[in-house]
Amino acid sequence: MSYQSCHRHAQISARKVRPLANMVRGKFADEALDLLRYQPARGARLLEVVLKSAIGNAQDPDQNGGKSINPEELVVVEAHIDGGPVMKRIRAMSRGQAFGILKRTSHITVTLDTLED
């Protein structure tokens, strides 16, 4: 059974988080947490929170028919970062000019599954 968690409308560009998602995809959940914990990027903190939430969903006995799953048995089978809505802002410049600023957001999704599946 797969366990999923997502963070929608994260205030970070998708291209800043995608390399981190590629790094943890296919790893065990506890190993992925250790990798993300020592990454200096801000996107690693966001991805780490989503991964912890997915692990919490797997450990919830109500979802698993009364049993709790050990995080060492879980594998990150899917970690994808999709682009979210873009907020468009304008910065005033000299001589009446204006330049656009794009504040990009992203949707972070992590799916875990047990090893024996």
Image (cartoon, rainbow, N blue to C red):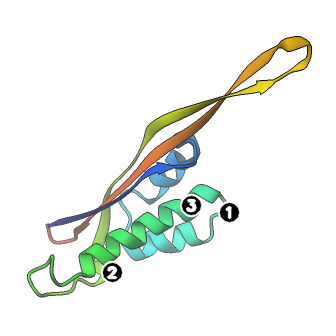
**Structural distance between the alpha carbons of marks 1 and 2:** 24 Å
* Image-based side of 98 in relation to 14, left or right: right
Taking the view exactly as shown, the residue that stands out farthest to the front is: 96
N-terminal of the pair, mark 1 or mark 2, is: 1
Picture disc at residue 44: 3
The location of residue 7, given as percent across then percent down, is 41, 56
What whole-number distance in Å separates the C-alpha atoms at marks 3 and 1? 7 Å
Residue in view at x 45 percent, y 37 percent: 83
Q: Which of the labelled discs sits on residue 60, or is there none? A: none
> What label does residue 40 carry, if any?
1
The local secondary structure at tag 2 comes to: helix
Q: Do the residues labelled 3 and 1 touch (CB within 8 Å)?
A: yes
Dot 2 amino acid type? Glu
Crowding near the residue tagged with mark 1, few <14, some 14–19, many ≥20 C-alpha atoms within 10 Å = few
Distance, label 2 to label 3, CA atoms, is: 20 Å
Residue type beneath disc 1:
Pro
Quadrant of image for the N terminus: bottom left
Q: Residue at x 37, y 71 (%)?
A: 53
Residue 30, position as x, y percentages in the image: 41, 76
Q: Closer to the observer: label 2 or label 3?
A: 3
> The C terminus is located in which quarter?
bottom left
- The percent coordinates of residue 28 (x first, y second) are 36, 70
The residue carrying pointer 2 sits among few (fewer than 14), some (14 to 19) or many (20 or more) residues within 10 Å by Cα, namely few
Q: Do the CB atoms of the residues marked 1 and 2 lie less than 8 Å apart?
A: no
**Mark 3: few/some/many CA within 10 Å (<14, 14-19, 20+):** many
The amino acid on which the numbered mark 3 sits, given as a three-letter code, is Ala
Q: Is residue 20 left or right of residue 109?
A: right
